[in-house]
Image (spheres, grey):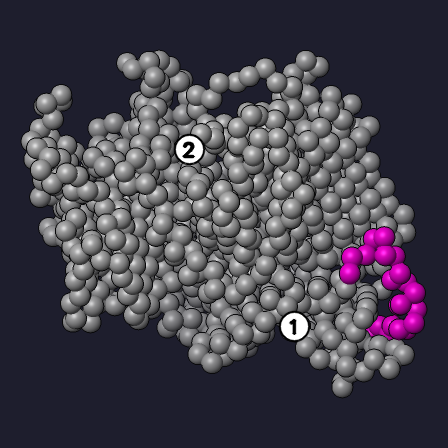
Amino acid sequence: MAVTIRLYISLILLSGLGTSHFLINPLWNIRKRSLPDTVVNGIEIYSTKINCKVTSRFAHNVVTTRAVNRADTAKEVFFDVELPKTAFITNFTMTIDGVTYPGNIKEKEVAKKQYEKAVSQGKTAGLVKASGRKLEKFTVSVNVAAGSKVTFELTYEELLKRNKGKYEMYIKVQPKQLVNHFEIVADIYEPQGIKELDADVSFITNDLMDVLTTSFSGQKGHVSFKPTFDQQRSCPTCSTSLLNGDFIIRYDVNREQPGNVQIVNGYFVHFFAPQNLPVVPKNVVFVIDVSGSMAGQKMTQTKEALLHILDDVREEDFLNFILFSSYVTTWKENMVQATPENLKMAKDFVHNIKDTGMTNINDALLKAIEMINNAQEMGIVPERSTSIIIMLTDGEANTGESRVDKIQENVRNAIGGKFPLYNLGFGYDVNYNFLEKMALENHGLARRIYEDSDASLQMQGFYDDVANPLLTNVNLQYPQNTISDITQNSYQHFYDGSEIVVAGRLVDFETNSFVADVKGHGALNDLTFTEEVDMKEMEEALKEQEYIFGDYIERLWAYLTIEQLLEKRKNAQGEEKENLTAQALDLSLKYHFVTPLTSMVVTKPEDNEDSEFIADKPGEEVKADQISHVYATQLNYQPPSNPYYFVDGDPHFVIEVPQKDDALCFNIDAKPGVVLNLIRDPDTGITVNGEIIGEKEPSSETKKRKSYFGRLGIVDPRMDLQIEVTPQKITLWSGGRRTSFTWMDTATITQNGLSVTLNRKKNMVVSIGDGVTFVIVLHEVWKKHPIHQDFLGLYTVDSHRMSAKTHGLLGQFFHPFDFEVFDVRPGSDPKKPDATMIVKNNKLIVTRGSQKDYRKDAGHGTTVSCWFVHDNGSGLIDGVHTDYVVPNLFYHSPTNF
């Protein structure tokens, strides 16, 4: 029997280069052997290379890891790569003993059916999930035979965005294992010439300084980091790695002209970033949520950020504050200039902000728009100035006008396209999709402010991005009848330190020159910038094949076009949305990009059978450290690495906390007949309740009667849907129709967004629209057993698709949360140590234990290690377990939370 070892090779990759992290997490109780320092649990990673080629801001990244199984049994090797959310995976291959298994990009719907089949069979998923603020993780595994070699190679591409005057590549280096050959190499080619290039390494030592090289000359730049095996050691005799920290590459280009046009093989790209222009005075209204939910740390951090922002406001600017809770209040009736006296009064006002009441977003934004319009009409603000609104909220509209579509309509009509709206969503209780849509349709953008110790710095950082407008109403124009398929070419603002990028296709290939005109309003006058490109000179200048990869401008154009189509799609409806989707899908398939519309399918060998894993890109609204919509089928493989949320057995609740690579568990003791709310999403109404049943007789050993879930009820009021599941039968009510099955049936029902698959005497899979999927496992016992009886288990898939307000005994854990475990010590059972845990501001005594995941094998299950929280989850669950008791199986009124 092969031993499965979980080997994690994690490479965090951000903004065009990667972050490398190797996490070795062997299963518990695997006995170590005396092996070389390069071998951990039988697996040797003998080479890891991160190679990045950047040509004109477009980054092409290849991550390659080679490993060999030095053990005498087969091992499961996991390859984890964390890459930027803005990047598109373009290829993945596995090479096993010289045979390469390539990836193919397919439409996502093609992969979805394979995924649902995999879930119904209890198979696991290779996955892409959100990982922190800016990353998403790609994961895949393969079973490697004794003595065999495996090579993983992942390729992804993205356009580097200029921010605060620099292009930045961030690499998080954390191998946690010595690697025979480890290297990071970045080659940069910029036709404008490289102005500056540097690398900042947090873990640098005198020895490592010799292996870090940074150089640039003319149009070429090079960064290399190749530590020897011994230089990686944390001490001369240690087998642990010193490489642990941040590796950051920053660069910028020469800007002798305001813009730069490049043309290759019938495609052009225009970079525009003028320098040394006077700042356009701005009129900014800060619209701040001061409802009760902002109390405490959020309000403290918001005030701190506003005070720092006031220190940076220019005297030429005008400003005002609008506070909203149940009511809307203003600091001043009209916009006021940022004189020293007014700034002092503004700081006093911020100091005295207090939280109270509910959340009236509609009235607050309409008041801000009215204030700016009045200031412009009355001549209070300079004629040559620009206006912006910055709103910060941590919740959803719940008083006044609370319909999000109506608020969007009111704001859109009031602004009338005259100035942008920027929305900051504080934490995860906001309706971020609503904030993003409203910002995008008003020429702004949305940004999430993460609840963390640096929240105030996040707010200040956003303001810094928009603090210095250099141009307004920027329009980039090109020769008519010579171009087509152009990306966005008009922008309401150009901010200092940023860059506008426009790409398109050439129609007239015979032209000898190409002229680009840019017009915009400056602080003093209207400006026009003209750039003419000689086509022959351009061809000669771009013959640096050593630094250039393929048709990079064509791929840059495709990347930018897809990105903008997907953004437009967020606010589109009906036929327009269908057309945008079709265009983005066609380009994604043509250029081999994994986007939110496509999936990558890789067929790999597994115990003499072919199996497929399917990976797709998370959607825009994904909670940090939560699993995304990504799928894989892997035959003959246990599923320890997927985030899981389930309740099964006596009843055991098991919650994975992905960022900890660990799980928590607790039991609920309730009497037979009690119905408990397991999951409830107040936004959709989707609810799952479970009724407790007991053993026929108490156990002779414990004298205690164990309890289980004997009935489950699923409700979706939007579909007029109710499903009752018992160990005997399944009954479905939908639209007034009733359908019944027994567990002896094998059936599939698909109607109106509902998909139900029944696998005979094993499990059933319920998928509701584009939302969550539930897997219900049947546990059967001998009918004449004197004690036990049949019961059910509930497993959730795609829990991130439920809203941030989802609650219930299980549902409350779909939101990100953190815990710390320390002081691990012997417990009453020598095999189960005790520890102290801090979670939700509670200090608990927990015990290391294990539970069973029965998705694949309802008879024996797969062992899941977890920290057990005693006393019905006290201190871990919100409130007490009796708060979750509901009157009946289909009860779906609001809970106490």
* Residue at image point 47% right, 22% down: 30
- The reply to whether callout 1 and callout 2 are in contact (CB within 8 Å) is no
**Secondary structure at numbered mark 1:** loop
Callout 1 environment at 10 Å: few (<14), some (14 to 19), or many (20+)?
Answer: some
Left or right: 284 with respect to 257?
left
Nearer the viewer's eye, disc 1 or disc 2? 2
Q: Position of residue 604 (x, y in %)?
A: 55, 48
Q: Identify which residue, 506 or 451, lies in the foreground.
A: 506
Report the magenta residues as a range. 529-550
The residue type indicated by label 2 comes to: Asp
Q: Which residue was labeled with disc 2?
A: 662
Where, quadrant-wise, is the N terminus in this rendering?
top left
**Mark 1 to mark 2: distance in Å?**
45 Å
Q: Identify which residue, 48 or 508, lies in the foreground.
A: 48
* Residue at image point 7% right, 35% down: 696
Q: Identify which residue, 373 or 426, lies in the foreground.
A: 426
* Residue at image point 14% right, 32% down: 706
The residue type indicated by label 1 comes to: Gln
Q: Is residue 511 visible?
A: yes
Q: Is residue 40 above or below residue 880?
A: above
Q: Position of residue 355 (x, y in %)?
A: 36, 48
Left or right: 337 with respect to 628?
right
Disc number for residue 488: 1
Disc number for residue 152: none
* Residue at image point 40% right, 52% down: 118
Q: Identify which residue, 132 or 166, lies in the foreground.
A: 132
Q: Position of residue 541 (x, y in %)?
A: 90, 63
